[in-house]
Image (cartoon, coloured by chain):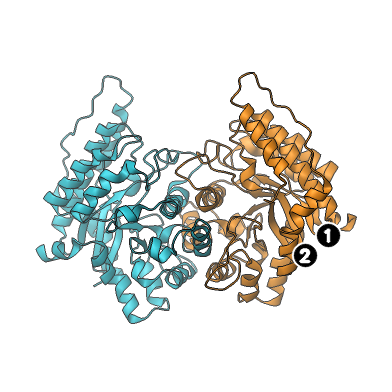
Chain colours: A orange, B cyan
């Protein structure tokens, strides 16, 4: 089985965008109060939105299962307040649940959280519990920068985040550390903020000692780990200068990288410097880059081709395509058995 | 000749730090006004600070010339106001000038600018002119984020920066796009802010069309281009989705990457995906990572070894080690002839 651990619902029915636009428009009206309006999206609309996109790509590329979450840029935790974020997260997560109910063989759900700048992460726990215990979600996307490109939250190693981690450990769900849209005009979202978020989060983890306090907590750093594998010597050296343990002991029992790197040399480097035990196959479809690479004739984001062409033993390739996902997502097995 | 295009004066005499500390302490006193106090540093102190460090490493590693600038984190443009930054930049640049006068065979000077958050970059022009026309500086370090980790300035492609670019073109000096210290507790300086700065700047250049307006302007993106070469497919694809020209036409007549990547696989990737015409040898010594890599037995930042071991033709290696520097720094040749 080939499991793509990083897919987003970026082909949502128009009604969802209309709801969000109304929510954002309401923020400008002082008398407006957020409401969780009923959203009329039929099963057929959901089927159509998925069938010609993510499902089609799964068939064409030969992947079996996508661990599926709401559009990452759509989370936009910087918009509105915690209540706005709460209603928006519930709606997006409900929609992911419906996709996974309609296509149980193809998708397993991961949720977004109702984060909001400066708001205690405890606030996210009820929605996380609802998703995991009532709707079978197996993981979450955690935004390390709810301010959307200004980095106003404490580092992920700060006790500020600990109540959320306690709940994650209790529920046995990992987090993908994924920034959302950037509202900073200097910082492009898919070209800078996403990649910087990965790099920044990993460096926060080097500086701290989070996994001493949470030895079973698991994080996935998407987009191939941002800049980290390319600068693996720099990060090993920085950790060494700080008298930290070797990175494999300090972080690699808890931190995983995905394969959302859109050319062969990048995947070759990733699979060379990061142990196969710490790599999860992913494509980010339908995602950041939608075109066909003129140098290969295939889509940039057809990352399965790069993993297949990388110098890997069959055992390591199986880890990356399949078995690591079960290790990182302890609830995945039961979710598949329930289908 | 082997030219290291990225070296910082990170071994400054203690008196410089004392001056800066007094300057910073003064900021807390409302009655304080910045003054450019005389700084008593003897030639012998400068010689001693360089001889056992940068000079020693040049000799040991077999490099000939370092393009030398003040400590990057020391610029800290977020501290104080434009006047504070002005005095501090003058002092740091004067010190670099003295180093280069004392060791004319080993160093050629590059300046920092008196940037300050929100202050018009025009304000930097007099100091740039002073350094280039009076003291023989051949380039500058440009901080794309004077706020120190909060990214409050417009993108580098914004007309906000144009007066500075006009002066750079007139003076024939390139800029290394280099962030400084981070005052953002979420963003580590050498492990996140530097690398993110590189990535962010490159993405700004993709989105804009700066080099249509300044066809001879030259930027160096340090630290191997941040995350960019590792994600070269992503950046090619993003440019393609935005209907931009191929990156080699859009940016590579004006943008160069250095080799401050501290392990062999990183340099192998850099030299594979980026044309040799766009790579400049650099080590960032004495810099971000000071230890010895236990996997190789050599210093992480001994990047010459990686470039020598990379699969490159002799002609391409010469470009990277030597000849590209003359192309990117038009004033280098005359500076060497004046020695």
When the figure is inspected, residue A286 is found, relative to residue A157, above or below; the finding is below
Q: Which residue is mark 1?
A: A105
Q: Quadrant of the C terminus of chain A?
A: bottom right
Nearest to the observer: residue B79 or residue B250: B250
Nearest to the observer: residue B179 or residue B292: B179
Q: Is residue B55 visible?
A: no
Nearest to the observer: residue A244 or residue B83: B83
When the figure is inspected, residue A49 is found, relative to residue A25, above or below; the finding is below
Q: Chain of mark 2?
A: A
When the figure is inspected, residue A339 is found, relative to residue B61, above or below; the finding is above
Nearest to the observer: residue A74 or residue B46: A74
Query: In screen coordinates, is B123 left or right of B244?
Result: left
Q: Is residue B212 visible?
A: yes
Residue A55 is labelled as none
Residue plotted at (54% across, 47% down): A204
Expressed as whole percent of the image width and height from the top left, the position of residue B59 reads: 26, 68
Q: Which residue is mark 2?
A: A64
Expressed as whole percent of the image width and height from the top left, the position of residue A154 reads: 55, 37
Q: Separation of disc 1 and disc 2 at Cα?
A: 8 Å
Q: Chain of mark 1?
A: A
Q: Residue furthest right?
A: A338
Q: Residue furthest left?
A: B338
Q: Secondary structure at mark 2?
A: loop
Expressed as whole percent of the image width and height from the top left, the position of residue B323 reads: 26, 71
Q: Secondary structure at mark 1?
A: loop
**Is label 1 in contact with label 2 (beta carbons under 8 Å)?**
yes
Please tell me in which quadrant of the rendered image residue A115 appears: top right
Residue plotted at (52% across, 36% down): A152
CA neighbours of label 1 inside 10 A, class few (<14), some (14 to 19), many (20+): few
Residue plotted at (89% across, 54% down): A338
Expressed as whole percent of the image width and height from the top left, the position of residue B90 reads: 20, 41
């Amino acid at each position: 089985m080939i499991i793509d651990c990083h897919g987003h619902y970026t082909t949502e029915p128009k009604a969802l965008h209309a709801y969000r636009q109304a929510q954002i428009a309401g923020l400008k009206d002082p008398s407006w109060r957020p409401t969780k309006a009923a959203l009329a999206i039929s099963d057929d609309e959901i089927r159509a939105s998925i069938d010609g996109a993510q499902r089609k790509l799964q068939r064409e590329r030969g992947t079996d299962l996508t661990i599926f979450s709401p559009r990452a840029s759509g989370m936009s935790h910087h918009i509105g307040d915690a209540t706005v974020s709460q209603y928006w997260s519930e709606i997006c997560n409900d929609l992911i649940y419906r996709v996974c109910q309609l296509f149980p063989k193809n998708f397993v759900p991961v949720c977004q959280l109702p984060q909001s700048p400066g708001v205690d992460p405890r606030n996210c726990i009820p929605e996380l519990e609802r998703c995991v215990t009532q709707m079978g979600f197996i993981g979450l996307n955690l935004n390390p920068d709810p301010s959307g490109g200004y980095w106003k939250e404490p580092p992920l190693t700060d006790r500020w985040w600990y109540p959320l981690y306690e709940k994650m450990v209790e529920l046995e769900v990992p987090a993908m550390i994924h920034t959302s849209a950037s509202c900073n005009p200097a910082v492009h979202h898919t070209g800078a903020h996403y990649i910087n978020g990965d790099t920044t989060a990993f460096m926060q983890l080097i500086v701290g000692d989070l996994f001493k306090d949470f030895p079973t907590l698991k994080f996935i750093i998407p987009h191939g780990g941002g800049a980290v594998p390319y600068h693996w010597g720099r990060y090993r050296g920085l950790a060494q200068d700080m008298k930290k343990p070797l990175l494999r002991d300090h972080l690699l029992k808890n931190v995983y990288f995905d394969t959302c790197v859109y050319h062969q040399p990048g995947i070759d480097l990733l699979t060379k410097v990061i142990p196969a035990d710490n790599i999860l196959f992913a494509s980010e479809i339908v995602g950041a880059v939608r075109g066909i690479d003129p140098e290969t004739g295939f889509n940039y984001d057809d990352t399965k081709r790069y993993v297949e062409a990388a110098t890997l033993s069959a055992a390591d390739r199986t880890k990356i395509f399949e078995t690591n996902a079960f290790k990182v997502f302890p609830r995945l097995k039961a979710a598949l058995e329930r289908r």
